[in-house]
Image (cartoon, grey):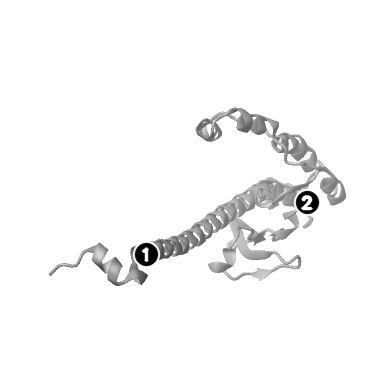
Amino acid sequence: MYTTRQSLNGRFPHLKNAPVLLTTARSGQSLIEACIAMGVLCLLFFGLFQLSQVAAAREILHHAAARGARCKTVGFNRFMVRKSIRVAAIPNAGHMTEPGFDGSNTALRDMVETMRPGELWDAVLSDVEIPTTRQDLELARIPEFMASENWARARYILDYEDWDAIRDTVPTFVPDGTIMEIRVAQDYPLRIPLHRTIYAPHPNADGVDTVLMHGISSIEGHYPLYLNDQDW
């Protein structure tokens, strides 16, 4: 004998809305599961993005060490070597603090206001150069920074918030006495959200989490053959 829904509703009126309640419960469960999955995906995305930033910063330190070694081996003094290293490490140096820079980009703002999202995305990723005020300032100030006579003048010309976190060693020769090595270290700041979920660094004096990285470069140190730099 089969029982119809109408007869069930007549005999058990309190079960009349049971299917609706069951559907609502399943929808709520799906929403919670989706939120958990999105949270895990966000953690994974932020973690991978932070790792990519650290990997790129490490390559920049190797480049800075190479620029410093090249500068030293052609006979420049320690002051010029350090300036060369700092300029090469600008991508790791954070925000520009001198000269003052408000970060405005009128060209990009105009594109945002006039283009659709797809067109804007294609334009930004294309080979078309978008002029930036910061780029113009850097191109104008870097030659003057390299020509400065002391650190007080150099910092007045160009400075960045994380430049002091970049340190270099005195050029040293390997045991055979022909190959010179320069090391550049940096307490690289970790500013990507949720980075502590994959790495627990030690904060610096300002409370910013950092990771210690090194860049190394070796080059033939032939400058002592024709120059006595008196270790300065």
Is the Cβ of the residue at disc 2 closer than 8 Å to that at disc 1? no
In the rendered view of the protein, which quadrant contains the N terminus? Answer: bottom left
Q: Amino acid at mark 2?
A: Phe
Residue 151 position, x and y percent, is 84, 51
Which residue is the site of mark 1? Answer: 17
Q: Residue at x 63, y 65 (%)?
A: 212
Residue shown at 30% from the left, 66% from the top: 9
Q: Residue furthest left?
A: 1
- Check disc 2: other Cα within 10 Å, few if <14, some if 14-19, many if 20+: some
Which mark lies nearer to you, 2 or 1?
A: 1
Above or below — where is 133 with respect to 34? above
How far is disc 2 from disc 1 in space, using C-alphas? Answer: 81 Å
Residue 196: x percent and y percent?
Answer: 58, 67
Q: Does residue 209 show up?
A: yes
Which one is in front, 207 or 217?
A: 207
| Quarter of the view holding residue 109 | top right
Sequence order check, earlier mark of 2 and 1: 1
Q: Callout 1: helix, strand or loop? A: loop
Question: Mark number for residue 166?
Answer: none
**Image position of 75 (left or right of 2):** right
User: Residue at image x 77%, y 57%?
Assistant: 231
Query: What amino acid is labelled 1 in the image?
Result: Asn
Which residue occupies the extreme front position in the image? 10
Residue located beneath label 2 in the image: 79
Horizontal and vertical percent position of residue 26 = 38, 64
Q: Is residue 130 visible?
A: no
The C terminus: image quadrant: bottom right
**Residue at 61% in and 30% down:** 111
The one of 167 and 55 positioned closer to us in this rendering: 55
At which x and y percent is residue 56?
56, 52
